Image (cartoon, rainbow, N blue to C red):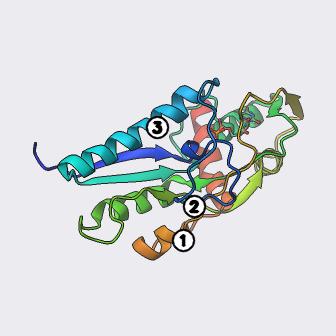
Amino acid sequence: RLKARISQASTSEVYGDPSVHPQTEGYWGNVNPIGPRSCYDEGKRCAETLFFDYYRQHRLDIRVARIFNTYGPRMHPNDGRVVSNFIMQALKGEEITLYGKGEQTRSFCYVDDLLDGILRFMDRPADAEGATGPLNLGNPGEFTIRQLAEKVIQLTGSPSRIVFRPLPQDDPMQRQPDISLAKRQLDWAPKVCLDEGLKPTIEYFARMLS
Ligand code: UDP
């Protein structure tokens, strides 16, 4: 009604356990519709559908960003995600819980880089080419979860040891954004590598604990 520009914070989870690597926006994904992750994955897929229906029917000024794994200061310490889990466990000297063999990969984007990308995306005029998205936003630097655990142990100087726990069902084996489109359209690419971004994140959790 107010002709407001509206953004949907979508997710790399729309690609499910991807058979295309790295993931481009044109890939339709590989999602189990009835598994334990499905409410999130299919919910986000349905949200994208509704955004594009409103765009087609009402010319709503939409922006759909597919956000890949993001981390940084002010993450919630107990939401169960891997970066916060590992850092909290390392700082408390607890066991580092690696799910599966830790061979699955993720690509971690520092929060400031992501926000810069989102703001550039939101600022593009509605008549710019591909203004609606969907647009991948993330850092293409890909790591195994085991590598992440080792980095966190090294950067915190923690005595924690790694323990292995069962891999959750439908856990994606690999994930890496293809950000060619964002580079071209937004003149954007992440600047902060994982080692650099983990330092202020570790400091944040350490301050919180003390
Ligand atoms: N993971 C892990 N230990 C943990 C939490 C997560 O090994 O304590 C793994 C998880 O199985 C997945 C990866 O880390 O393969 C990323 O998990 P997260 O929940 O952070 O993000 P998502 O799976 O949604 O990308």
**Image quadrant where one finds the C terminus:** top right
Amino acid on which disc 3 is placed: Lys
Residue depicted at x 65% and y 45%: 202
Q: Is residue 17 above or below residue 81?
A: below
User: Which residue is denoted by mark 1 in the rendering?
Assistant: 180
Q: Position of residue 150 (x, y in %)?
A: 83, 48
Residue depicted at x 58% and y 28%: 38
Amino acid on which disc 1 is placed: Ser
**Image quadrant where one finds the N terminus:** top left
User: Which residue is denoted by mark 2 in the rendering?
Assistant: 24
Q: CA distance from mark 3 to mark 1?
A: 23 Å
Q: Is mark 3 within 8 Å of ligand 1?
A: no
Kindly check if marks 2 and 1 are in contact, taking CB atoms under 8 A apart as contact: yes
Residue depicted at x 28% and y 64%: 123
Near-viewer residue (153 or 9): 9
Q: Residues within 10 Å of mark 1 (few under 14, many from 20)?
A: some
- Left or right relative to 174: residue 95: right
Q: Quick one: label 2 or label 1, which is nearer the N terminus?
A: 2
Kindly check if marks 2 and 3 are in contact, taking CB atoms under 8 A apart as contact: no
* Residue 44: image tag: 3
